[in-house]
Image: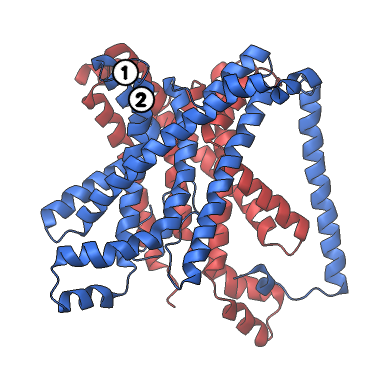
Amino acid sequence: MGDILSQYDVLGAFWLTIQLAVFSAVGALLLGTVVAVMRVSPVRILQMLGTWYVNTFRNTPLTLLMVFAILGATFILGINLAPGSINDNNFRWAVVMLSVYHAAFVCEALRSGVNTVPAGQAEAARAIGLTFGQTMSQVILPQAFRGAIAPLGSTLIALIKNTTVAAIIGNQEAAGQMSEIVENEGSSIGIFLIFALGFVILTLPLGLLFTSMSRRLAVKR
Amino acid sequence: MSTSVLFDAPGPKARRRHALLAALGLLIALGALYVVLRKMGDAGQLQKDLWSPFLTAEVWQEYLLPGIWGTLKAAAISMVLAGIFGLVFGMGRLSHLSAVRWVSSIVVEFFRSVPVLIMMIFFFGVYADNNVFATEVNPLAAVVTGLTLYNGSVVAELVRSGVYSLPAGQSEAGLSIGLSRGQVLRSIQLPQALTAMLPALIGQMVVVVKDSALGYAITYLELLNWSKTLGSAYANTVPAYIVAAFLFITMNYVLTVIARMVEQRLSRRGRTTLPGVATTPTGGDVEPAAAGTVGAPGRGM
């Protein structure tokens, strides 16, 4: 066990996992917010585009998106995100695909937050004469964000676990490192536990944090 | 809250603004479509002979149907096993013996936080090193093991939140007519909980179908892997992946529609259902954060 840890850069692999997760989380949050705004907007065409985005990317395997990024987009369509460095191109495409895929879930998390607000809240706000802007900023969005904390937390945790799929296109993050070790040393429960516990350490505190936040900030109804 | 409550009925000014936004959105979408088609055209991916093979029986018989079969086979076996796993550990988490409860909780939480791909790589290595199955069965076995452990844990959580979502009067009534705790769980709570979680369970199938594509990494021959082979055989990689994506989306969309139908049917009969992929669209491989709203708040992490 000790020599596996000294022979392979396991910590470095997890560092790459964290980098993938952070960049993709930011990307997914930005893109997902745009799609969510489109889906709740009053404009029919924007709603349809948003729905199309969610249905398409939520139902496509992330693995397919990743494989397509390299074998399709890079090799055949010639879209190289980092000419000169294969590793950088793999990393950037992984971030792009992780963002695109999870944006669909971020959108639905935000939308489900809006859905937790009862219709009476908006009606009451308008009845006392608040404008649209006031209704949104003072009444609806503060409640909607609180309702979205739990699903956003699950999305973030799923994203961290899904960074492993980036191994399929040659990123040496946790899963890539693990499959190299398994190939060289054979599979053992010790190797599995090292990597499994790494992910438990990455996701468990986040889960507890989001659970306590969503409880603390929950709107009492 | 439906969108109509967010906004007032538009007046003439707002209608003009909406028309402008619609035109702008359409323009951007068409622009994006143009860029994609242009890129594909430049790379020669729109030529007719790259797409025409998909109209031949050979491509379907030799590549796509075996691919779909591989995906559905792995998904179906995993879902059945995950159901059993989930039932056992879900009941374990509801047990009144604290030791059983603890062990079940640790098992469920552990397998829920480990990425499926990590499990698949591990079990593929174990099966291959020890010749557990025949060589050509090893990838399937590893895919099924990984999917079962992860989705079984998710199902266990569904079972638990399904039982928690029942009114307390159900178990109290059972206990007061003299049933034991086990009898209450088996003959009163579980049947209702299972009905309530049926839509969420079908929705979970979407996750299983999608995650079966991870088998690509351990040489399991599912739809994605067959599409890759197809792409090199006909030199039409990009069209092959696009068709594969379309097939995946269709399979999953059908499952989502079935889940929604089951849910509507149940709610017509006055049953409440667990919010699953069908209702709260947190779905996908985000574990039912839905579970967060029922019974155990925020549990769906």
The x, y position of residue B23, in whole percent, is 85, 53
The x, y position of residue B38, in whole percent, is 81, 28
The x, y position of residue B99, in whole percent, is 11, 53
Of all chains, the one bearing label 1 is A
**Residue highlighted by disc 1:** A182
Amino acid type of the residue tagged 1 in the rendering: Val
Give the answer, above or below, for where A139 lies relative to A99: below
- Residue drawn 35% across the image and 23% down it: A178
Q: Residues within 10 Å of mark 2 (few under 14, many from 20)?
A: many
Q: How far apart are marks 1 and 2 (CA)?
A: 8 Å
- Residue drawn 44% across the image and 48% down it: B204
Of all chains, the one bearing label 2 is B
Q: Look at the numbered discs 1 and 2 and tell me whether their residues touch, using CB distance below 8 Å.
A: yes
**Residue highlighted by disc 2:** B121
Q: What colouring style does the render use?
A: by chain
- Circle 1 sits in a helix, a strand or a loop, which is it? helix
In this rendered view, identify the residue nearer to me: A189 or B167.
B167
- Residue B220: quarter of image: top left
Q: Colour of chain A?
A: red
Q: Residue most toward the bottom?
A: A128
Q: Can residue B198 be seen in this view?
A: yes
In this rendered view, identify the residue nearer to me: A46 or B190.
B190
Amino acid type of the residue tagged 2 in the rendering: Ile
Q: Colour of chain B?
A: blue
